[in-house]
Amino acid sequence: MIIENIFVLAFIAAWCSADVTAFGQFMIYRPIFCAPLIGFLTGDVTSGLWLGMIAEMVWINAVPLGVAVPIDISLISMLSTFWVNKYFPGIQEAAIWSLVFAIPFAYLYKEIDIAGRKFNIKIMHWVERGVQKDKESRINLGIFFGLFLFVLRLYIFYLIAMGFIGILYQMIYLQFPAFMVAGFKKAWFLLPVLGFGAILHNFRNIKVPFLESRKKC
């Protein structure tokens, strides 16, 4: 079943992105899962799996730790999968362009997310004042309201990105000269190699106990 309604797809994408820090943390936000999911819902799971694999390998160390706010890699993978399946289904060159085109919007949403987290501080203070006045019901209200705003801003962002920004993605791709399109075609096969190199780079300092013990012997 192919879903073309962007209101439904934006809702699904928003909940996948919310899994990063707001709710669940079931790892459904990882590109290797959410990109094929959007691909399945839009009719081409292969493109979703390939784009998700590339995003997963390149940004495998982009995880929220403490107060760190990494870029939303689920946003990159899901938007790129949606755009290519909607406008250029099955075209590998357009898939790579969609991946590149989605990256700036991930950084844009990062700033929006930071602003939203600052607003959550006001909600926290409102809850604290309520607890001091024996209004403990504000705890549940604060959690619900914070989660609601988190998902709402994701939902609105995905709606705009899947709709209006998707049209921009299509228009720009159609203006590319042949040599750039040929470059995107080669990148379809070369980017996984880059991703594998990124994995080796990110985990170069990890020590394996078994190997370390062998070295001492």
Image (cartoon, rainbow, N blue to C red):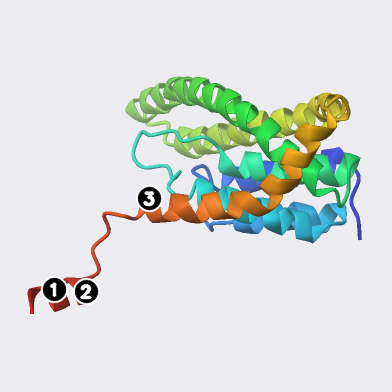
* Residue position for label 3: 201
Coordinates of residue 162 in the picture (x, y in percent): 80, 33
Q: Which residue is mark 1?
A: 215
Residue 65 position (above or below residue 166): below
Is 201 placed above or below 149 here? below
Near mark 1 (Cα within 10 A), the count class, few <14, some 14-19 or many ≥20, is few
Residue drawn at 80 percent across, 37 percent down: 181
Residue 23 higher or lower than 165, as above or below: below
- Does the rendering let one see residue 41? yes
Q: Quadrant of residue 53?
A: bottom right
Q: CA distance from mark 1 to mark 3?
A: 22 Å
Left or right of 181 in this view: 61 = left
**Tags 1 and 2 touching, CB below 8 Å:** yes
Q: Is residue 205 left or right of residue 75?
A: left
Of 196 and 41, the residue lying toward us: 196
In depth, the one of 47 and 190 nearer the eye is 190
Residue type at the position of mark 3: His
At label 2, counting other C-alpha atoms closer than 10 Å, the crowd grade (few under 14, some 14-19, many 20 or more) is few
Q: Where, quadrant-wise, is the C terminus in this rendering?
A: bottom left
Mark 1: which amino acid?
Lys
What amino acid is at disc 2? Answer: Leu
Q: Which mark is residue 159?
A: none
